[in-house]
Amino acid sequence: MIIDTHCHLYLEEFDNDRDIVMQRAKDLGVQQFYLPAIDSSVTNAMFKMEHEYADNCFLMMGLHPCSVQENFEKELSLAYMWLQKRKFIAIGEIGLDFYWDTTFKEQQIIAFEQQMEWALEFDLPIVIHTREAMQQTIDCVKPFAQKGVRGVFHCFSGSKEQANQITDMQFLLGIGGVVTYKNAGLAETLKQIDMKHIVVETDAPYLTPVPHRGKRNESAYLTFIINKIAEVKEISAAEVAAITTNNATTLFQQERYK
Ligand SMILES: [Zn+2]
């Protein structure tokens, strides 16, 4: 059993063939799907997907840093309302993104810290998105990690040194399609990272692994990511699947979800 720990299968990119996409993944052993939130515009689509695939889909709740804008307090209050109302697998995806736009840099930090407070309040792991802001993100997380917050740095593509800082905080690294990109250097970094720190993810429909890079990503392609990790770590794909699934179930404790 393999878990895609980060995929946005509820997005409209899958509206025409969601059943087929799910079946293709299941046929390859990818049987569970953790769906990160973005903002309130996707909440209904997430709930609908959970309703339709109740045995396989697990929802997160949170405000993505790229959705932190003028109305971020309203967005946060909606996310908080849902967290009070029902169960989620994690708070995510949350974090800092200074790549696209830094207009709301301060608000991004406020929103991120607020949501890490909720992780403590609701005893949930967090799923972190960080872009062009790795060190700031680590610095924000550190005091919360010391209070016991745990989670994943999703789509990790940093250096060995950054990986060490993250794993020192007892956080995991989400490895996705970037590991298959030749120029990214992640495969080299991964050689020096213990498998106990790793979970796998697609981030579908984004970040498609080789050989489908440039097309829409989907959870079945997790096998390309797992095969690449197996090659880099010189272990079997079955071992990669077993270890990363175990890491994910230990962190997310999905038995608490329903
Ligand atoms: Zn994502």
Image: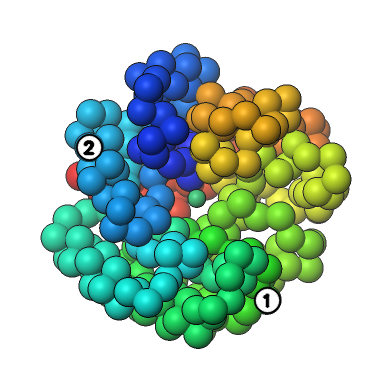
Residue 118 numbered tag: none
Query: Which residue does the numbered mark 1 point to in the structure image?
Result: 135
The answer to whether residue 147 of the structure is visible from this angle is no
Between 133 and 169, the one lying in front of the other is 133
Q: Residue at x 44, y 21 (%)?
A: 21
Disc 1 CB within 8 Å of nearest ligand 1 atom? no
Tell me which corner region of the image, top left, top right, bottom left or bottom right, holds residue 96: bottom right
* 15 is higher (above) or lower (below) than 86: above
Tell me which corner region of the image, top left, top right, bottom left or bottom right, holds residue 119: bottom left
Task: Look at the image and name its color scheme.
Answer: rainbow
Residue 185 placement (x, y as % from top left):
84, 49
Q: Which residue is farthest left?
A: 85
Nearer-N-terminus badge (1/2): 2
Could you tell me the amino acid type at mark 1? Gln
Query: Which residue does the numbered mark 2 point to in the structure image?
Result: 48
The answer to whether residue 22 of the structure is visible from this angle is yes
Between 22 and 108, the one lying in front of the other is 108
How many numbered marks appear? 2
* 194 is higher (above) or lower (below) than 99: above
Does dot 2 land on a helix, a strand or a loop? helix
Residue 160 placement (x, y as % from top left):
79, 62
Q: Residue at x 18, y 66 (%)?
A: 81
Could you tell me the amino acid type at mark 2? Lys
* 33 is higher (above) or lower (below) than 79: above
Nearer the camera: disc 1 or disc 2: 2
Residue 18 placement (x, y as % from top left):
37, 24
